[in-house]
Amino acid sequence: MRQPRRRPHFGWTILSTSLGFALVQLDVSVINVALARMGSDLHAGVAALQWVVDAYALAFACLLLSAGVLGDQIGARRTFIAGLLLFTAASAGCGLAPNAMALVAARVVQGIGAASLVPCSLSLINHAFHHDPAKRARAISLWTAAGGVGLSVGPVLGGVLTDAFGWRSIFLINLPVGLAGVGLACRFLEESAPHRTRFDLAGQLLAVATLGVLTGAIIEAGSVGWGAPAVLGSLSLGLFLGVCFVIIEGRISAPMLPLGFFSNPTFSAATAVGLLINLTLYGMIFVFGLYLQQVRRFSPTWAGLAFLPFSGTLTLSNVMNGWLSRVWGPRRLIVVGTVLGALGFGLLHGLGATSPYSAMLPGLLVLPLGVGLAVPAMTASLLGTVPKARSGAASGVLNTVRQSGGAVGVAFYGALMAAAGVAGIRAAFALSSALLLLAALTAAWGIRERNARPTCHLPDDVWPEKYRR
């Protein structure tokens, strides 16, 4: 006789899935205040440090959608546990890396593991609470909050650990947490039913090649100049590969990146806003962390504490977003948020080699206030354009584009800093102001507030069976 399905325990399910997501987000931000000490220990320049950051972001961005497909094929629980084990093992590799090249390689593996955790953790939550939409919404909210906590505490935790135990400790601390997460997942998470789905190998390879070549070209430009033949050749090759990727994705029946989503102007505008926000924000965090330690000579702990106003305001504005969205609507929030972000970058533009922390503080408060208002509203606008059954795929596209933007931002802003020092940082912040104003214009023009009906249409054979209506 078949046993009835056991109802999952809410708290343990949330803890099991959220722990992995918090680790993923923690490793995005924890590294920035350890970069100066890391570079000194490994004799690595700015370009090598950019690769340490971008290796993780690129692997994460390129494999995010395909990891979701893999979870559909072999089961989300199995993929989640494998990803967490891989992430934990790679963290050990990062902590034991003898040189910068080994560290970059381990960060790539970390990013592969991270890409497996994010879509599968959401799929497991959906599987556990599909019978109770209210409980599922609360679970996703707590999962999102856990990621926000990981991202926010990263700089402070990274600074304290680096000062107390050395930069390797920021990776080694993942080992007990990761193993605990594996134990919880084995004990409390239920496997989802596998689904037959097609894997877009050509699209996956082209995505990796395109982002890798473009990012490498931008990083090297900081050392050899934008006019160097190798840089120009790599940029041309990257653009060519990108065009090939778009052409192939538009022709095959089961693309990694469903281009049909972009037929809706709100979806396209929200994705563009997400790209610009991550490009400017990740680039700023990278160069500002180096500025605090290499120019202003802050210790890692004090550099981490210097990010506290930024992290606190970001969390507060995220909390405010739900109420303000009901009052103002998503489009107005995105416009106001990106304009505030542009103002925040403008306030940081005047930083010099001897600027006191009090001069940095206004920008560190206004910038995250704007970003915290814009990002949830942007996500809500995008998800409002697709049927609920396809929201997972749509959010996967958004996250892939945002992570790609973040990787390019680190590469480009790091190149400006490597080429011109503090003047390069000021140029990066001025460019950020302009890009966020462009994001505000894009939102004002492209976001349709009353676009309540989902309007992104794709053929049914593009979707795994569980996503079809």
Image (tube, rainbow, N blue to C red):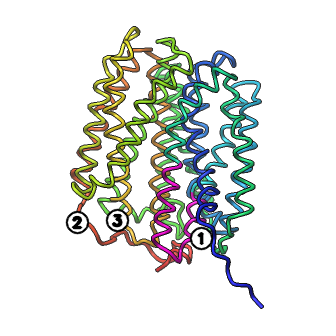
Say which label, 1 or 2, has the lower sequence index. Answer: 1
View extreme (top): residue: 354
Identity of the amino acid at label 1? Ala
> Which one is closest to the eye, mark 1 or mark 3?
1
Mark 3 touches mark 2? (CB < 8 Å) = no
Magenta-span inclusion, residue 467: no
Say which label, 3 or 2, has the lower sequence index. Answer: 3
Q: Quadrant location of residue 358?
A: top left
Q: Residue 35 carries which label?
A: none
Q: Label 2, on which residue? A: 450
Residue 52 x, y percent position in the rendering? 61, 31
Residue 74 falls left or right of residue 453 = right
Residue 212 x, y percent position in the rendering? 57, 40
Taking depth in this image into account, of 348 and 300 the one nearest to the observer is 300
Q: Residue 384 carries which label?
A: 3
Q: What stretch is highlighted in magenta?
A: 119-146
The main secondary structure of the magenta stretch is helix
Please, is residue 96 above or below residue 59 in the view? above
Please, is residue 123 above or below residue 176 in the view? below
Q: Label 1, on which residue? A: 128
For the point 24% across and 46% down, the residue is: 335
Magenta-span inclusion, residue 133: yes
Identity of the amino acid at label 3? Gly
SS state under label 1: helix
SS state under label 2: loop
Identity of the amino acid at label 2? Arg
Taking depth in this image into account, of 317 and 355 the one nearest to the observer is 317
Say few, some or many: other residues with alpha carbon within 10 Å of mark 2 (under 14 / 14 to 19 / 20 or more). few
Residue 288 x, y percent position in the rendering? 45, 24
